[in-house]
Image (cartoon, grey):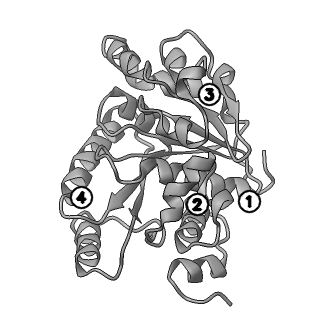
Amino acid sequence: MSADVSEQAAVVAVANQKGGVAKTTTTLSIAGALSARGLAVLVIDCDPQACATFSLGYDPDALAPTLNEVVAGRAAIADTIVAHPETDLVPASIDLAGAETALLTRTGREHVLRGALEPVRDAYDAILLDGPPSLGVLTLNALTTADRVLIPLQCETLSHRGVAQLLDTIADVQHLTNPDLTVAGLTATMYDGRTRHARAVLADVTERYDLPLAGPPVRKSVRFAEAPNRGVTIHAHDPSVPGAAAYRVLAARLLDLPVDPDDEARAEGRPPR
């Protein structure tokens, strides 16, 4: 455990049932930012599409056991962990889709991941859960396990509808399975502040749902699409882009760590000191 964080690992779910909003990019970028600060980080790929697993350079079909075996009760989570240079990973595979169906008939199904995680939680400073693009039982497991939930938001017209549905689900989880769950806020991804539309959508969603921005908007960059081809996060690929700086600010704020003023400046398009 790092000297920076003394208490039990913070568990953050990155969730939005709408696809294509950069959930995986957000999860891995936060993980890479925290790892670069010397923290011990674990990413759990909760998506049967295994985007986080693939983005870190692994073939999901070549790994075993994975999270599928954990939720099925056939493996301990410690036995699935893969040590990537930037973060430890609990990988996923397409088989996880079948496990989700099997969980529907299981008593206490929302608590399976939380219970499985307990034996390794003290080994990490931060645990990040990359949720699937749905509000099914795997997302409910992630929300039941997490201390807080971060909502990536692409600033387009239909974004508010997805946020409303997710907030309803979060409210149910807070009432039924995890009363300690808090909403860390929104993070605006793939953001183009030059367009009136993006600015208007962001202002509308934050005001409509009274949600804070957890960090500065993450500006678009082709570098984010390039990083998975190398099996690394943006911080190993090109830490100089404004979006990478935005994720470093976001990661620091999520864990109440000091924020680098130069990163704040870069994220906002201002020259650093």
For residue 179, above or below residue 262:
above
What's the residue type where badge 2 is placed? Ala
Q: Which residue is mark 3?
A: 118
Q: Residue at x 64, y 59 (%)?
A: 237
Q: Secondary structure at mark 1?
A: loop
Distance from the alpha carbon under mark 4 to that under mark 1: 32 Å
Q: Label 4 neighbourhood size at 10 Å, few (<14), some (14-19), many (20+)?
A: some
Please provide percent x and percent y for residue 172.
Answer: 28, 38
Q: Label 3 neighbourhood size at 10 Å, few (<14), some (14-19), many (20+)?
A: few
Image mark for residue 159: 4
What's the residue type where badge 1 is placed? Arg
Distance from the alpha carbon under mark 3 to that under mark 4: 34 Å
Chain-order first, disc 1 or disc 3: 1
Q: Secondary structure at mark 4?
A: helix
Q: Secondary structure at mark 2?
A: helix
Q: Label 2 neighbourhood size at 10 Å, few (<14), some (14-19), many (20+)?
A: many
Q: Residue at x 41, y 68 (%)?
A: 213
The quadrant in which residue 143 appears is top left
What's the residue type where badge 4 is placed? Ser
For residue 17, above or below residue 76:
below
Please provide percent x and percent y for residue 101.
Answer: 32, 16
Q: Which residue is mark 1?
A: 37
